[in-house]
Image (cartoon, rainbow, N blue to C red):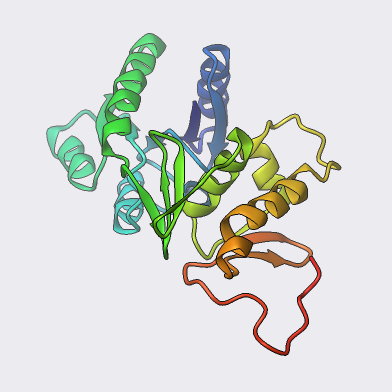
Amino acid sequence: MRILVVEDEPKMGELLSRGLREEGFYAEVATTGQDALWLAETGDWDALVLDLMLPDHSGVDVCRRLRAAHNWVPVLVLTARAEVPTRVEGLDAGADDYLVKPFAFAELLARLRALLRRGEIERPVVLEVADLRLDPATRRVWRGEQEVVLTAKEFDLLHLFVRRPDHVLTRDWLLEHAWDIAYDRGSNVVDVCVRSLRDKVDRPFGCETLETVRGVGYRLRATSRTANPAGRPKARR
């Protein structure tokens, strides 16, 4: 499970992230609201632990912006203020739970586990981009009415693209999220898997949706286009 900790106080951020890692989570720390919003958009997080007092945006503002962008990642808010109006403001902004400092780390873990169980229910059953459909629960994929059979790794990679249509995803980011953070970054495994995906979800259907962004990575187009129009030589990838 991947947890984003949003905390501007270095010692607290380090304590939380280290404690989460010791419990088997992957944890990363953002120290500003702007960094939190960027990481929440580009990362595949299972939950956010969000401090209300940040140097640029308030935690309430961060939570409100996430929900406005239709990002429904579960959010556990941390604050030193126990007043009811403060808790109500955070919950009204879209937070899922509230924890007042100081707190026992065991309680934070228990609340996170509860949010993670609840968060699975809120996620969409089937993800769609143009005529491409992906069902995370059954791990099945269709192009139109035709089912496409993928390997486990091809499915994991496509899942990342489908959740972020029209976003450019770097090779390093894809490597970290679909393989492992410690995987050899000099490997061409991402390029090989993308080529394999194209051979299954694009080329048999005469379309081009999985694009190469030269020098950066790849992007899944939200709208499909016909591959290799008449008279144009097929581009080499």
Residue at left offset 43%, top offset 45%: 54
- Residue in view at x 82 percent, y 35 percent: 184
Q: Quadrant of the C terminus?
A: bottom right
Residue in the image at 66% along x and 56% along y: 199
- Nearest the viewer among 48 and 157 is 157
Frontmost residue, 189 versus 168: 189
What is the x, y in percent for residue 121? 27, 33
Relative vertical location of residue 152 with respect to residue 133 in this rendering, above or below: above
Horizontal side of residue 11 vs 147, given as left or right: right
| Vertical position of residue 143 compared to residue 16: above or below | below
Question: In front here: 226 or 223?
Answer: 226
Asked if residue 235 shows in the view, the reply is: yes
Q: Nearer the viewer, residue 90 or 229?
A: 229
Residue occupying the far bottom of the picture: 231
Work out whether 75 lies above or below 225.
above
Q: Quadrant of residue 229?
A: bottom right
Residue 37 visible to the viewer: no
- Give residue 44's position: percent from left, percent from top: 50, 41
* Position of 101 relative to 196 (above/below): above
Residue 17 at what x, y percent from top left? 55, 24
Count of labels in the image: 0
Residue 214 locus on image (x, y percent): 76, 67
